[in-house]
Image (spheres, grey):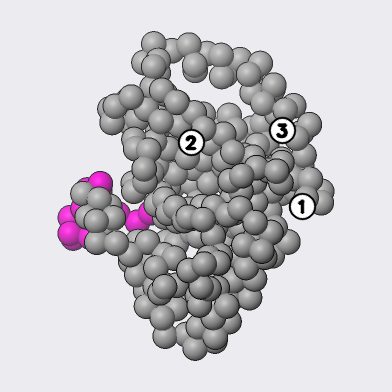
Amino acid sequence: MNLSRFLIVGVLSLFIVLLTFKTGSAGRLPRHEFYQLTIIHFQTAAQEHSIDSFLQQAYLPALHKEGVEKIGVFKGRANDTSANKIICVVIPVRAFDKLFQLSAALAKNKDYQAASTPYADAPYSSPPYTRIENILLQDFPTETPLQAPSLNGPRKDRVYELRSYESPTEKLFQNKVKMFTAGDEIGLFKRLNFNAIFYGQVIAGSKMPNLMYMTSFENMADRDAHWKSFGDDQQWKKLSALPEYQHNVSHIDITFLYPVEYSDL
């Protein structure tokens, strides 16, 4: 397995992205931040150890060397007994072609190749994971770049909440994005100190049309208190009642995560 494939480099994904944007007068894509969300599924403690070793000793150091900062690595909360455990990796880049450049750089990085050998050369009878998903996102039109949270408690207690909002149609999806931006739902999250990590439109993934965002809290009690404040807030009650923002979400997935010790976020 070529580990540089850990990054999204598929030609199909590129076509999807290019068709998503409108080019400027100079024929160049508008400037945005992009996020690659990689979800690694695993089952055993041995697989978890293999993935952690690969990420901590090979993958993140190699990306840092290429100038990529604020890489988030998170594990699912309360899933020790689950048959399907996950590790999520969030990689921010300022230009889409940076993903291609990273893939090429990793392929030439001898230190990375050596450090990743146990993971790369795992036998078919003992793979280091069950499956890998890659999701590509673009930041919202207001250009809300990825942010490191302002949290002080132990990492093991923190709650990072990843939400995916699916919409019935592309038009209603854009309406939900507008609710976040022009409707200032983002401003509400900021005012209530939700410690948002990122907001992104999915431009290559398996559940389109959808958007995803991540907020963070000191612990689960803090998370519950924040969402109660959100639900009780007059701005939200007014915004959610507006006729133009009705029926723009058909399904919501919520995943609770916590940051590993070697995560940048």
- Where residue 111 appears, as percent x and y from the top left, is 54, 87
Q: Quadrant of the C terminus?
A: bottom right
Image coords of residue 95 (percent x, y): 37, 62
Report the amino acid beneath label 1: Arg
Q: Position of residue 86 (x, y in %)?
A: 59, 50
The CA distance from mark 1 to mark 3 is 14 Å
Separation of residues labelled 2 and 3 (CA atoms): 17 Å
38 to 179, vertically: above or below: below
Q: Earlier in the sequence, mark 2 or mark 3?
A: 2
Residue for badge 1: 155
Amino acid type at image mark 2: Ser
Residue 26: within the magenta?
yes
Q: Is residue 161 left or right of residue 95?
A: right
- Residue 164 is labelled as 2
| Secondary element type, mark 3 | helix
On-image quarter of the N terminus: bottom left
Q: Does 175 sit above or below residue 23?
A: above
Q: Position of residue 197 (x, y in %)?
A: 58, 47
Dot 2 and dot 1 residues touching (CB under 8 Å)? no
In front of the other: 175 or 261: 261
Residue 258 lies left or right of residue 92; in this view the side is: right
Would you call the spot at circle 1 few (<14 residues within 10 Å), some (14-19), or many (20 or more)?
some
**Which amino acid does the dot numbered 3 rest on?**
Arg
Q: At 70% across and 43% down in the image, what residue appears?
A: 81
Q: Nearer the viewer, residue 261 or 75?
A: 75
Q: Residue at x 39, y 52 (%)?
A: 136
Determine the secondary structure under disc 2.
strand
Residue tagged by mark 3?
A: 223
Give residue 226's quadrant in the image: top right
Do residues under tags 1 and 3 come within 8 Å of each other at their CB atoms? Answer: no
